Amino acid sequence: MNEMSYEQAVKRLDEIVSLLEKNEIELDEALALFEEGTKLTAFCTKKLSEAKQKITELEKE
């Protein structure tokens, strides 16, 4: 996941949400997708936090 860009992660999250909303997958697959989505959300949150910190640092200069 570290090699993934923020934009790729958001796109994958959108795919996961679409799959889960359809209710056409088995429970085990739904749980795996939910777990992946949780990890992607944490990844995106971290990337946004890092970007915010960088902007704050640049504004100080």
Image (tube, rainbow, N blue to C red):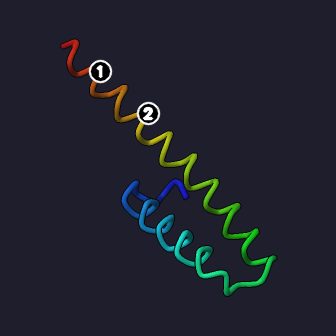
SS category of the residue bearing label 1: helix
Q: Position of residue 7 (x, y in %)?
A: 36, 59
Do the residues bearing badges 1 and 2 touch, measured as CB atoms within 8 Å?
A: no
Q: Is residue 21 above or below residue 25?
A: above
Nearest to the observer: residue 50 or residue 41: 41
Nearest to the observer: residue 27 or residue 11: 27
- Amino acid carrying label 2: it is Ser
- Amino acid carrying label 1: it is Thr
Quadrant where the image shows the C terminus: top left
As measured in the structure, the alpha-carbon distance from the residue carrying label 1 to the one carrying label 2 is: 11 Å
Q: Residue at x 47, y 58 (%)?
A: 3
Q: Position of residue 52 (x, y in %)?
A: 35, 30
Q: Residues within 10 Å of mark 2 (few under 14, many from 20)?
A: few
Quadrant where the image shows the N terminus: bottom right
Nearest to the observer: residue 1 or residue 28: 28
**Residue 8's mark?**
none
**Residue 56's mark?**
1
In the shown orientation, is residue 33 left or right of residue 58? Answer: right
Residue behind mark 2: 49
Looking at marks 1 and 2 on the same chain, the residue that comes earlier in the sequence is marked by 2
Residue reaching furthest to the top:
60
In the shown orientation, is residue 17 left or right of residue 24? Answer: left
Q: Residue at x 47, y 68 (%)?
A: 14
Q: Residue at x 81, y 76 (%)?
A: 28
SS category of the residue bearing label 2: helix
Q: Residue at x 40, y 57 (%)?
A: 5
In the shown orientation, is residue 55 left or right of residue 29? Answer: left
Q: Is residue 59 above or below residue 8?
A: above
